[in-house]
Image (cartoon, rainbow, N blue to C red):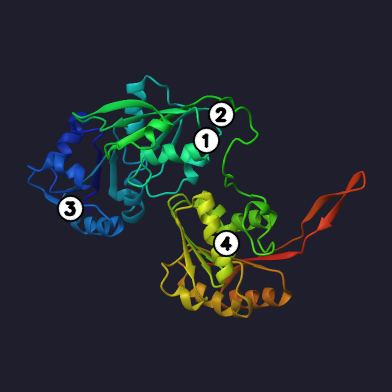
Amino acid sequence: MIPLEVVGLGMSPADLPPRSLDLIHRAQVLAGGRRLLEYFTDHPAAKIIIGRDPAGTIMELGKLAQTRRVVVLASGDPNFYGIAPLLVELLGAENVVIHPNITAVQAAAARLRLPWHQAQVVSLHGRGWEALAAVLDRRGTIFIYTDPTHTPAAIARYLLELGETQARFCVLEDLGQATERMIWLSLDEAADRTFAPLNLVVLPLTDPAASRGGDEGRWAKPRLHLGLPEENYDTEGGLITKAEVRAVVLAKLELHPGQVLWDVGAGSGSVGLEASLLLGPGRIFAVEKNPARLARLRANREKFGVANMEIIAGQAPQCLSDLPPPHRVFIGGGGKAVGEILATVLSRLRPGGRVVLTAARLETLEIARQVLMGAGQRLELVQIQVNRAQPLAEGVYLQALNPIWIIAGASTGR
């Protein structure tokens, strides 16, 4: 196989060094987004658009590279929120050569004369608001990659809803193009404005408390974070995976960005919602059959703005057949069907996948243990006993919560 050359164009072909230009000129196949390919309409190479199915297109490029010189065009640095990691994952590091270039963040920092070595960089492309929410309490500058949903106007409205009334940000449009421009706006000014599709938002923050009059009431909405107290979720009679148990469950799941997670018997959705903070561009499928809990699940998803959670209203395991194969599965419910659900999950789990269950009843524990051992899974078993301090007279006492078993299964071939 001839290694694929992945060439970052910077802001435009004007940023290409001679070596990268030579690779493009000698290419027999040029692949990339439609906008990047339009720079090379006169090039004699075959053109392949990398669109809605990047993985499928990349596998086709791998076949072409058996006999032809393939160059994949990328904007900026292909390793920085770009296509290079997916190419390496699918084709192997030995079959990919990466040629980085200037990124939009570097270009924006240069235009604004801003240092960026301690800046926060957030991509909202295909993601939810949680990525931005996670960095708003920090000092420094935030560079925000947008998409057609998370436009500069939508970002302004989101910040206004969170109580950011004094902030201003800069929108840089069409960086590196003849139509390039940058404009500083208040959030109110930006909220109803239309911008060029190709843009980057720069939000300089100093001390967050300074613009909001201290920490009290800083945000109009609660912020999603790991171990969020139960009272922040809309629940049915307090039925929720407790924060301490949630923390161990998320650790046992061993989540990584880009994975697919099934949250079966999702209830209020607390595990899946907090998992979104660790999955990045991954996807969460929250499965729930109870109509009242479904309503609360949807309310919690909207409350915390988790866009990569899809809610599946149905009875497991029957409703699992149409879901994409998971890397990770959490089973927090299931009742008498837990054995059947677990068997179905194991039949769909990707190689190297993990499944984690919680059980309050010894019967559920034993069913899960038997199914996992029968399937040859490596079994991990933990019991969590949580005691929380509560006021008593002039002191405190420890109030015990129900003990919970956490059962994890992993393929022995990992």
- Whole-percent x, y for residue 226 in the image: 61, 48
* Residue at mark 2: 208
Quarter location, residue 176: top left
Report the Cα–Cα distance between label 3 and label 4: 44 Å
Secondary structure category for the residue under label 3: strand
- Whole-percent x, y for residue 115 in the image: 42, 22
Of callouts 1 and 2, the N-terminal one:
1
Q: Is residue 340 above or below residue 276?
A: below
- Whole-percent x, y for residue 59 in the image: 27, 59
Quarter location, residue 104: top left
Of callouts 3 and 4, the N-terminal one:
3
Of callouts 2 and 3, the N-terminal one:
3
Question: Mark 2 is on which residue type?
Answer: Pro
In the displayed orientation, state which residue is furthest to the top.
Answer: 113
* Residue at mark 3: 48
Check residue 320 in the rendering and tell me which mark sits there, or answer none: none
Of callouts 1 and 4, the N-terminal one:
1
Q: Nearer the viewer, mark 2 or mark 3?
A: 2
* Residue at mark 4: 296
